[in-house]
Image (cartoon, helix red, strand yellow):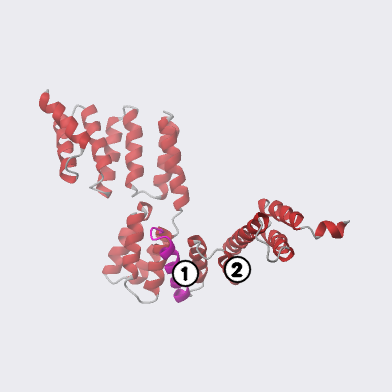
Amino acid sequence: MNQAFDSCPSDYYGRGIALYDRGLYAEAIAEFQRVLEASKGSTNPETRLASFYLGEAYANLGLAQARMNMYERAEESLRLALMLHPEYADLHFHLGVVYYRQGRYSQAEHEFVKATQINPSYARALMYLGLSRLFLGNESGLDDISKAAMLEPVYRDERYHTAIESYHSGDWPQALRLLESVAETDLDEVGYLLEKGKMLMNKEIYDEASQAFLEALSICPRYADIRNNLGLCYLRQGMTDMAIAQFLKALEINPRFVGARLNLALAYEAAGAHDKYIEELNRILQIEPGNPEAERRLSQIAGA
């Protein structure tokens, strides 16, 4: 009875999924492999799913091994995952990081190039591609890092700006050290806190919203969008001076941030600073001619 049970691909698949859901990836891999061995030549949905989850299990196992600095095993697992999912940009990225951590910059560069070919807007891959190239003595890496920073505002903090200055002044060791620190920024946590703050603000839970924005700023103080949202949170509570301070900081980071400049204008209006209100509306039209909100408000003033 047990032998017949063990020979059934559906049972292997079911056990594989149960193990996968528990994070037991090595054990899940064995079960998914049994499905494929027992279903050779088959293209039924269960076989295709087993192949998919086999790749996912290899990927997750590789990431776990990389976190434990087991780089040789991580490389093997991620390579096996890529055999099943060759067009997954994340897999190329994570394999590149495994190479990068070992100082294998040429191989890392190859994987980061693959990741950015699949997803040209992959900021983390561009950042590490740039670092790999700089370590290889290729100064075009600075262009990749600049692209990454344009795509991901979280990167544009004080460390980033100091690193660029250090690089141009010839202090390459400090520049590389700072850029590696920037590359390690927890983008997922910052993004989570920003979205959490927006959600709470929309529900008018302002104290918790501002706390989420402040937590995000503690990770990345030069993120203009977080400053803008924190300012808006203050403005909605009638805390005009604090709102103005945040909008000004957002515009210091990105002077062409029209949303922050409009919010600054509204804050000046709320504070009774009529001349500054008009001045900011006119600045918006200089940056973005035809902006409908700025034009509407200036027309209202002219018709008053």
The answer to whether residue 234 is left or right of residue 27 is: left
Numbered tag placed on residue 32 in the rendering = none
The answer to whether residue 192 is left or right of residue 4 is: left
For residue 215, which quarter of the picture?
top left
Q: Which secondary structure type mostly characterizes the magenta part of the structure?
A: helix
| Disc 1 residue type (three-letter) | Glu
* Residue at position x 67%, y 55% in the image: 46
Q: Is residue 107 magenta?
A: yes
The answer to whether residue 258 is left or right of residue 98 is: left
Tell me where residue 216 appears, x and y as whole percent. 42, 45
Q: Which residues are magenta?
A: 105-122
Q: Neighbour class for label 1 at 10 Å: few (<14), some, many (≥20)?
A: many
Tell me where residue 41 appears, x and y as whole percent. 68, 66
* Residue at position x 34%, y 75% in the image: 138
The answer to whether residue 152 is left or right of residue 67 is: left
Q: Neighbour class for label 2 at 10 Å: few (<14), some, many (≥20)?
A: some
Residue named by callout 2? 80
* Residue at position x 61%, y 67% in the image: 77
Indicate the quadrant containing the C terminus: top left, top right, bottom left or bottom right. Answer: top left
Relative to 220, is 236 above or below?
Answer: above
Numbered tag placed on residue 111 in the rendering = 1
Q: CA distance from mark 2 to mark 1?
A: 14 Å
Tell me where residue 241 appears, x and y as whole percent. 27, 33
